Image: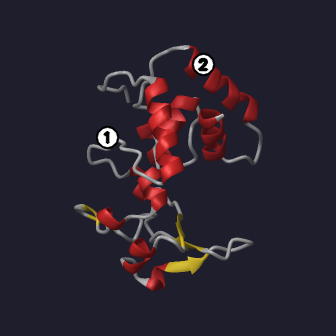
Amino acid sequence: MPSDRSAIDFATWRAQFRSALERGGNSAVPCDGCTACCRSHQFVHIDDDETDTLAHIDPDLLVRTPGVDAHSWVMGYDTAGRCPQLTDTGCSIYEHRPRTCRTYDCRVFAAAGVRPDQPLVADRAATWVFTADDQVERCRDRAAQMTEPGRPPASVALAAVLG
């Protein structure tokens, strides 16, 4: 699906994205009603320090993160692959949403030239267009070099953009 949005300046977007990740702020994605990430069979990671978020989620929806990280939780999805906080009108806890949701930015896939595993997110990511410059090309080259069997596209895209 072609984008009807203006091309995004890569350097500006990358600086804002990096800042959101480092500060735990919002990525400020212009979703325009899109909920692809909320409907894509994705687990949502929530750290113990997100007390406000945890206070707004039914504890029955949370499980401790398996493995070595005993200081975080995972919220699953329903049988349709939807986040249990997603309603017909959007996120029911939007003002209290997890850091993972606040910093999620599907534009990372377009920037790195990587197709995510989730078809709905892939379709949305394909609508983003970046200005064609050397930084974008270097990012995409890094992503191509990091792509290997078994490595999740999300980790490749994130590493390529932040590298």
The mark that comes first in sequence, 1 or 2, is: 1
Q: Measuring from the top left, give residue 49's x and y in whole percent.
A: 51, 72
User: In this view of the protein, which residue sits in the foreground, 40 or 18?
Assistant: 18
Rendered residue at 41%/30% (across/down):
128
Residue under numbered circle 1: 30
User: In this view of the protein, which residue sits in the foreground, 50 or 68?
Assistant: 50
Q: Measuring from the top left, give residue 78's x and y in whole percent.
A: 44, 71
User: In this view of the protein, which residue sits in the foreground, 133 or 11?
Assistant: 11
Label 1, residues with CA under 10 Å away: few <14, some 14-19, many ≥20: few
Q: Does the image show residue 135?
A: yes
The quarter in which the N terminus is drawn is top left
Rendered residue at 32%/44% (across/down):
31
User: In the rendered image of this protein, does residue 131 appear above or below residue 92?
Assistant: above
Rendered residue at 48%/42% (across/down):
19
Q: Does the image show residue 122?
A: no
What colour scheme was applied to this rendering of the protein? secondary structure
The kind of residue tagged 2 is Glu
Q: Measuring from the top left, give residue 64's x and y in whole percent.
A: 61, 78
**SS state under label 1:** loop
The kind of residue tagged 1 is Pro
Label 2, residues with CA under 10 Å away: few <14, some 14-19, many ≥20: some
User: In the rendered image of this protein, does residue 19 appear above or below residue 70?
Assistant: above
Q: How many dots with numbers?
A: 2
Where on the picture, by quarter, is residue 87?
bottom left
The quarter in which the C terminus is drawn is top right
Where on the picture, by quarter, is residue 146?
top right
User: In the rendered image of this protein, does residue 21 appear above or below residue 145?
Assistant: below
Q: Which mark is residue 137?
A: 2
Distance in Å between CA atoms under marks 1 and 2: 24 Å
Q: Measuring from the top left, give residue 108's x and y in whole percent.
A: 52, 37
Residue situated furthest front in the rendering: 23
Q: Are marks 1 and 2 in contact (CB under 8 Å)?
A: no
